[in-house]
């Protein structure tokens, strides 16, 4: 608990300084989304608040100026009263129309801002480097699109109008009270100060407990996530009692935190309501005494109005304090959103572009290299990749790749072998520029890859990753992901080549079967087949295969390999594999250890060397 | 649904009942105050009776303080009752989930179970808190203010009889028009979150295939859908503000006009007129709150239904009435077993399986992806129940055993396996809570995990990160095997559990298993021939059926599928 308090405290201090900045940026954002909506809203908020106060003052005039004289007339003339009520109706009408307008406008504006922020955020996110996704937790990124944006909506559609409205109401009420009787107003201020103190205390406590509740919620969520994910394992081990026991602990903590948080959140209104009542009673009492004893010039109507005003006095204070809390929450949300939007996009200074030209033989890829004189030189893409003394570290000072030099000639199959963490995947990350090297050079057909436009560089490389991710849509859409222009026939052909065709035909709706991001009922192996089909259809000059066949059964693997071999002919390929069986036929095998290339050569050469590879191959050593 | 959920109130019934009582007390006092103030004005101030003012003033002061205490208590009581109810709901759901069979688990995705445990419970908690506090307060306030205003002036109260229904109908119409938008909007949210999730998780694919622009288009489509619907819903909902303010203002003016006539006519006093204004506010505000509550309750009704569906889901596998608690040996018999995952499935996952495995035998199973290898072995520890036929272990139908007994004796290492947050030792002890350190190490040694575990920074006390990210695939598999061994089972099933372990280590594990656990029946599913070729018998599975059974040598001669796989792997291997 004390640690939690400290964390929350630290959080508070960190953000306090920048809050004003964030608020300004947020207001600018709202304003620039639709200035007229904001202006009209603000005007109507003022009108609504004003009409409210005028209404309360009217009751004083009603009694003193109309009813009391009327009771004295022998034949009461209701004409002036009717006129006054008609005028009041006009003022009220402005009030309720304004009320409607600002509610509507701010509501729509909040949606507009959300729409805009979401799109900006997503568009920007797509431009961020891979390192951002590697360093930030999925849930953390996700919550910016859900919780954080929601707090923004809350703030724009409710907090800002209510805050403004309450502040104005309070101001008008105070002015109106003063105009009725400064003595009673001063008296009210004592209650006012007291209320304000109580409200502040309660809202601060409540926001504290809400943060505690949020943390506890996060904890139980994490626990549930883990336990429900592993529910089958729990069942296999009959571990249900232990799992329940762990749950009970988190559940009890959350119960207490939630009970406290909600007590403080809801206690505000009965307390403020009754403070209002208290003020009401005291004014009737004090005002009455003052009127009788002529301590102050008070009419009965003034007391009536004052009573009415005093009711409107305590609620705005509670509102203001509550809205302050939710504004602070929204600012925290906005900060996290802005943080994402402020991340640097992937740097891309490349100028060389890729183009595909069809001739009678088939299609050929070309690099278009801009020359100093403004013309462009066409270089055919052959897939000659050279790593020249490449060094790299994810975190400065913690070098991952040491002096890597590779010469992958066009059409070569290059295999990378080594333990987990030896740097195999890192090498492929260098080639497609998911990360940029620290020193050395990497060239593609003689062109330094940093001079090639990133999108075009990636268009020239296909990757089949360890873990396959699919996107909601049909199987057809998912294969076409590799090349949106591909025809249906292209898709069928790619699926046949990768031997995905068979299982797709067994699905209820064949190629039109809709799958979601988790792959639904597809097995890991089937997902990999789709991933291979996707790479096939992309038809790119260089391939990177990252342990792509680990979950496919042997017969299928045999078929995939046959297709893959077709695909690899004439293409440069990098294969990362744990199983040596898939790489013995490579032209070049690189053995990596702690980011160094310790052995290189083809299978026979390496066997002759009797080094690390030999030990692996003969089973004396294992890859971990 | 309500009946199911209300079972979870339990020990919070008392608090839940106290809350409305406090609220009723508070509202009565609160509504009495304007009336008494009216009397105070008419009898005290108007008549200049100071002692009356003091007496009434004091009474009012005491009442206010009582009302404050009641109101604050209601908040405390309702918040804690609701939080307790929510905790019970979570517990009931979580406990019930622990009773789920694999079939039940397959019905819900784990993500949706997590949402039900948090977001949905949260919605119900809020609704419940509202029901026992505000939902009592608002109608109470409405009734009391109506009664009070009738006491003051029955004729002026007629205003409410006219405006009240108008107000209620208008609000009802607004809610009815706006409500259908919300389920659509929520579906829009689901879709949008899905796009984000897929892009964050699959960012490497997106970037590799340069699909940023199409994905952005996809996202904008989903966010645009939400914007369009939500903005429309907002426009409709803001009519609410118009109606509330308009009716309130009109009723105030009506009271002014008719009230003035009453006062002039002498049937009403000015103080009472002032009280009437307060009551008219209360009547309309309580109606407004009622409308809000109704909307909220309707929305949280969806959550309630989602929770109820978790609680009412019948576990399809339960302990028998008089269970056997001893399992004597590792004999397994499949007797004409058929199995379908869903009754509606067209094809059987298992078709007429007959099999007799002797205690201590080592059985290999091979077959293509989707040939039901895993399904076959899932029948033994009763992860699923057969659709027809029977599975017998040590002479008894698996359905007659106590589930814990059965599963402790039939140790299955799942294909999709997970480690849990905690130390490696904690994870290993899942197999046997009371295992000594020696036993833990012995099991780890058989699974060839001891070596790398000792090399880790804290050895057996190294913390496994969530999802087991700090151990490699092969290491994880060996830990999960050791975990299963600690059960000291009669039957051990390895479902492709060494796929990421290299061949030589795998061979050593097999040798240790044979040497150290000779009496245990071992069933090994694998894609690799080398992993199973030494088995006593090998089962070749094909589309839910046993295609062939035999030793490696027999199958090499007689089974084409088997020998072709073997030949291919041999070529690849050496």
Image: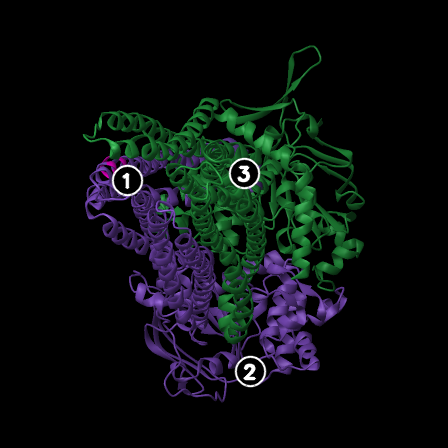
Q: Quadrant of the C terminus of chain A?
A: bottom right
Cα separation between marks 3 and 1: 44 Å
Residue found at x 40% / y 55%: B56
User: In front: A452, or A131?
Assistant: A131
Mark 3 sits on what residue? B206
Q: Residues within 10 Å of mark 2 (few under 14, many from 20)?
A: many
Chain ID at mark 3 = B
SS category of the residue bearing label 1: helix
Dots 1, 2 in contact, CB < 8 A: no
Q: Residues within 10 Å of mark 3 (few under 14, many from 20)?
A: many
Tell me which label, 1 or 2, sits earlier in the chain: 1
Residues in magenta? B255-260
Which of the 4 image quadrants contains residue A365? top right
User: In front: B20, or A442?
Assistant: B20
Mark 2 sits on what residue? B520
What color was chain A assigned in the picture?
green
Asked if B408 appears above or below A282 in the picture, the reply is: below
Mark 1 sits on what residue? B174
Tell me which label, 3 or 2, sits earlier in the chain: 3
User: In front: A127, or A488?
Assistant: A127
Q: Quadrant of the N terminus of chain A?
A: bottom right
Asked if B407 appears above or below B543 in the picture, the reply is: below
Can you see residue B468?
A: yes
Chain ID at mark 1 = B
Which of the 4 image quadrants contains residue B10? bottom left
Chain ID at mark 2 = B
The mark lying in front, picked from 1 and 2, is 1
SS category of the residue bearing label 2: loop
SS category of the residue bearing label 3: helix
């Amino acid at each position: 608990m004390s640690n939690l308090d400290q964390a929350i405290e630290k959080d508070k201090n960190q953000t306090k300084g920048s809050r004003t900045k964030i608020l300004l940026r947020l207001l600018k954002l709202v304003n620039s989304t639709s200035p007229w909506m904001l202006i009209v809203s603000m005007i109507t908020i003022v009108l609504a608040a004003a009409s409210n106060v005028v209404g309360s003052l009217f009751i004083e005039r009603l009694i003193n100026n109309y009813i009391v004289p009327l009771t004295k007339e022998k034949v009461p003339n209701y004409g002036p009263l009717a006129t006054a009520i008609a005028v009041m109706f006009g003022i009220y009408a402005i009030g309720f129309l304004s009320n409607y307008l600002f509610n509507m406008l701010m509501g729509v504006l909040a949606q507009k801002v959300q729409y805009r922020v979401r799109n900006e955020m997503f568009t920007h996110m797509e431009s961020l480097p891979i390192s951002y996704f590697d360093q930030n937790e999925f849930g953390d990124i996700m919550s910016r699109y859900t919780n954080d944006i929601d707090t923004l909506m809350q703030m724009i559609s409710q907090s800002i109008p209510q805050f403004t409205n309450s502040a104005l109401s309070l101001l008008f009420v105070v002015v109106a009270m003063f105009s009725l009787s400064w003595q009673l107003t001063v008296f009210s201020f004592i209650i006012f100060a007291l209320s304000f103190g109580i409200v502040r205390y309660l809202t601060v406590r409540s926001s504290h407990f809400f943060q505690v509740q949020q943390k506890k919620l996060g904890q139980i969520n994490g626990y549930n996530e883990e336990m429900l994910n592993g529910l089958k394992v729990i069942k296999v081990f009959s571990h249900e009692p232990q799992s329940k026991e762990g749950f009970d602990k988190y559940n009890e903590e959350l119960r207490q935190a939630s009970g406290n948080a909600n007590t403080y959140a809801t206690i505000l209104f009965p307390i403020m309501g009754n403070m209002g009542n208290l003020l009401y009673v005291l004014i009737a009492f004090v005002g009455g005494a003052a009127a009788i004893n002529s301590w102050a010039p008070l009419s009965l109507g003034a007391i009536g109005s004052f009573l009415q005003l005093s009711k409107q006095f305590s609620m705005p204070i509670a509102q203001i304090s509550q809205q302050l809390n939710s504004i602070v929450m929204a600012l925290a949300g906005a900060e996290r959103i802005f943080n994402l939007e402020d991340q640097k996009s992937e740097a891309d200074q490349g100028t060389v572009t890729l183009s595909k030209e069809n001739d009678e033989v088939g299609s050929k890829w070309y690099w278009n290299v801009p020359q100093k004189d403004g013309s462009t030189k066409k270089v055919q893409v052959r897939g000659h990749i050279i790593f020249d003394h490449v060094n790299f570290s994810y975190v400065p000072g913690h070098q991952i790749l040491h002096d890597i030099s590779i010469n992958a000639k066009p059409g070569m199959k290059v295999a990378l072998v080594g333990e987990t963490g030896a740097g195999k995947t890192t090498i492929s990350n260098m080639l497609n520029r998911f990360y940029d090297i620290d020193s050395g050079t990497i060239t593609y057909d003689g062109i330094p890859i940093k001079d090639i436009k990133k999108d075009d560089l990636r268009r020239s490389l296909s990757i089949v990753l360890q873990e396959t991710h699919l996107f909601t849509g049909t199987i057809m859409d998912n294969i076409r992901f590799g090349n949106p222009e591909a025809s249906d026939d292209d898709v069928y052909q790619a699926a046949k080549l990768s031997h995905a065709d068979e299982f797709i035909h067994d699905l209820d709706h064949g190629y039109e079967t809709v799958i979601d991001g988790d792959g639904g009922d597809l097995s890991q192996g089937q997902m990999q087949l789709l991933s291979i089909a996707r790479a096939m259809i992309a038809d790119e000059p260089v391939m990177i295969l990252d342990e792509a066949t680990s979950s496919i059964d042997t017969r299928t693997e045999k078929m995939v390999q046959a297709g893959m071999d077709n695909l690899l002919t004439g293409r440069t390929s990098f294969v990362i594999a744990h199983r040596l069986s898939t790489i013995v036929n490579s032209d070049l095998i690189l053995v990596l250890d702690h980011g160094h290339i310790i052995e290189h050569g083809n299978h026979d050469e390496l066997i002759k060397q009797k080094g690390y590879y030999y030990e692996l191959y003969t089973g004396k050593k294992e890859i971990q | 649904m309500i009946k199911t959920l209300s079972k979870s109130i339990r020990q919070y019934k008392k608090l839940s009942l106290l809350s409305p009582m406090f609220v009723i007390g508070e509202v009565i006092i609160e509504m009495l105050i304007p009336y008494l103030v009216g009397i105070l004005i008419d009898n005290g101030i108007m008549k200049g009776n100071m002692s009356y003012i003091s007496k009434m003033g004091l009474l009012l002061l005491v009442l206010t303080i009582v009302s404050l205490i009641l109101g604050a208590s209601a908040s405390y009581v309702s918040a804690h009752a609701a939080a307790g109810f929510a905790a019970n709901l979570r517990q009931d759901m979580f406990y019930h989930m622990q009773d789920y069979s694999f079939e039940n688990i397959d019905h819900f995705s784990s993500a949706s179970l997590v949402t039900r445990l948090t977001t949905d419970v949260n919605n119900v908690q809020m609704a419940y808190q509202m029901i026992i506090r505000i939902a009592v307060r608002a109608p109470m306030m409405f009734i009391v203010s109506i009664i009070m205003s009738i006491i003051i002036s029955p004729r002026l109260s007629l205003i409410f009889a006219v405006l009240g229904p108008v107000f209620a109908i208008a609000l009802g119409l607004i809610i009815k028009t706006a409500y259908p938008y919300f389920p659509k909007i929520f579906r829009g949210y689901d879709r949008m979150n899905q796009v984000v999730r897929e892009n964050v998780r699959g960012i490497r694919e997106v970037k590799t295939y340069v699909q940023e622009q199409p994905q952005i288009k996809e996202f904008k489509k989903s966010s645009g859908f939400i914007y369009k619907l939500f903005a429309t819903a907002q426009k409709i909902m803001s009519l609410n503000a118009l109606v509330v303010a308009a009716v309130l203002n009109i009723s105030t003016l009506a009271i002014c006009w008719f009230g003035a006539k009453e006062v002039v006519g002498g049937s009403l006093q000015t103080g009472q007129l002032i009280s009437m204004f307060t009551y008219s506010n209360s009547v309309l505000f309580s109606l407004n709150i009622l409308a809000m509550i109704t909307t909220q309750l309707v929305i949280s009704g969806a959550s309630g239904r989602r929770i109820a569906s978790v609680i009412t889901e019948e576990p399809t596998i339960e302990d028998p009435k008089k269970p056997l608690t001893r399992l004597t040996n590792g004999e397994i018999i499949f007797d004409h077993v058929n199995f379908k995952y869903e009754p509606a499935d067209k094809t059987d996952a298992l078709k007429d399986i007959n099999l007799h495995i002797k205690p201590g035998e080592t059985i290999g199973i091979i077959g293509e992806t989707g040939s039901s290898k895993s399904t076959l072995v899932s029948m033994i520890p009763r992860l699923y129940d057969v659709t027809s036929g029977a599975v017998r272990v040590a002479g008894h139908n698996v359905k007659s055993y106590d589930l814990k007994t059965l599963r402790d004796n039939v140790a299955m290492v799942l294909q999709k396996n997970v480690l849990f947050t905690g130390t490696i030792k904690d994870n290993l002890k899942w197999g046997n809570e009371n295992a000594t350190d020696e036993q833990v190490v012995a099991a780890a040694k058989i699974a060839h995990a001891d070596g790398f575990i000792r090399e880790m920074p804290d050895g057996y006390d190294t913390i496994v990160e969530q999802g087991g990210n700090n151990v490699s695939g092969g290491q994880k598999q060996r830990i999960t095997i050791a975990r299963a061994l600690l059960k000291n089972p009669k039957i051990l099933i390895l479902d492709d559990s060494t796929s990421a372990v290299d061949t030589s280590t795998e061979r050593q594990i097999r040798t240790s298993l044979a040497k150290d656990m000779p009496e245990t029946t071992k069933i090994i599913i694998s894609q690799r021939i080398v992993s199973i070729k030494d088995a006593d018998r090998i089962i070749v599975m094909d589309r839910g059926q046993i295609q062939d059974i035999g030793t490696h040598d027999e199958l090499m001669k007689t089974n084409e599928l088997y020998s072709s796989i073997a030949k291919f792997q041999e070529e690849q291997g050496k």
